[in-house]
Amino acid sequence: MDKLYRNKLAIIIFIAPAMLLFTAVLLVPICQAVYYSLCDWNALTGAKFIGLKNFEKLFTDDNTMKIAVKNSLFFMLFSAISQQVIGLVLAGLLTNIKRGRNLFKNIYYLPAVLSSAALGLLWSFLFNPKMGINQILATFGVDGPLWLMDTKGYIVLPMWMIALVALWQYVGTTMMLYMAQISGISQSLYEASYIDGANRLKSFRHVTLPLIKPMVATSLSLNCIGSLKFFDLVYNMTQGGPNHRTDVLATHLYYQGFQYFKYGYASAIGVVLLIMCLIVTFIINRCFKSENYEM
């Protein structure tokens, strides 16, 4: 095996397929997006190089872009905090029960495997002012709000509703990640903590939390990146409306590229989204540096 590791030709042969795939699927499209972001291009004519004018317009003249950045950051922060906290609590509770664990685990995880497009349409019907939740409230004499059409407030009500639906759909994924990590912790560590007089809450705080720190970084990175590029529920529940008040970066990119055929401008939005994802990942990795422990 050591001889194989020293054979550079063998290493290149094994790595080459993955590197070719990485270059073709990821690296080349990123380079193309960066180039087109510096061009005026509608996909029908040749790309005309215009420098940083697309980026200048993004942050000076495009009010929808400002709303999209605000909503994407709100969605990321809300999802990161709520899904991590609730997912960790559920994982801690389900790990410690013996009867019914698989049933509850499947119930919480089921929404994550369903189509986001279908769920978006389902919830849009439930939040419709003339049916669904409002119809139930009307039987009690209560006038329900315009769940997906209210435009009041810094963060509008439809954005809160989308965030809550996303929490319901994806909290099971976070729970499963933490359950996998917690199940790998040796029971002897918990027994030692009980002998020292710790209860379950203190054991969770002083034994479980330090040992799942690497998973916190992984789960938080996946959560934040997924939230920044979120598209499905927003598009199917509100289409970015009313009046672009629920637009996020992904929907704004979609409309600019595929409805207005401003592919250079849409590429600039994509580059901004990529930079935001890289910055968030860097911050998380810096904040959650941890050592690996034997469990």
Image: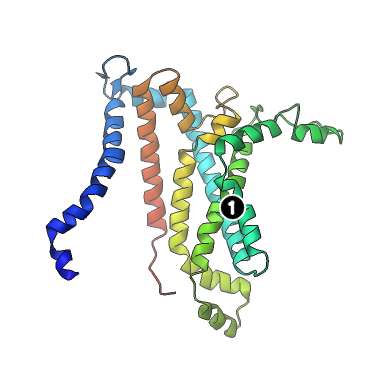
Q: Position of residue 188 (x, y in %)?
A: 52, 81
Q: Position of residue 135 (x, y in %)?
A: 79, 32
Q: Secondary structure at mark 1?
A: helix
Residue found at x 46% / y 23%: 255
Q: Position of residue 245 (x, y in %)?
A: 57, 27
Relative to 191, 283 lies left or right: left
Relative to 159, 61 lies left or right: left
Judging depth in this view, the residue of 165 and 78 nearest the camera is 165
* Amino acid on which disc 1 is placed: Tyr
Residue found at x 54% / y 52%: 173
Judging depth in this view, the residue of 236 and 191 nearest the camera is 236
Relative to 258, 99 lies left or right: right
Residue found at x 35% / y 33%: 271
**Residue bearing mark 1:** 109
Q: Quadrant of residue 47?
A: top left
Establish if 279 lies above or below 49.
Answer: below
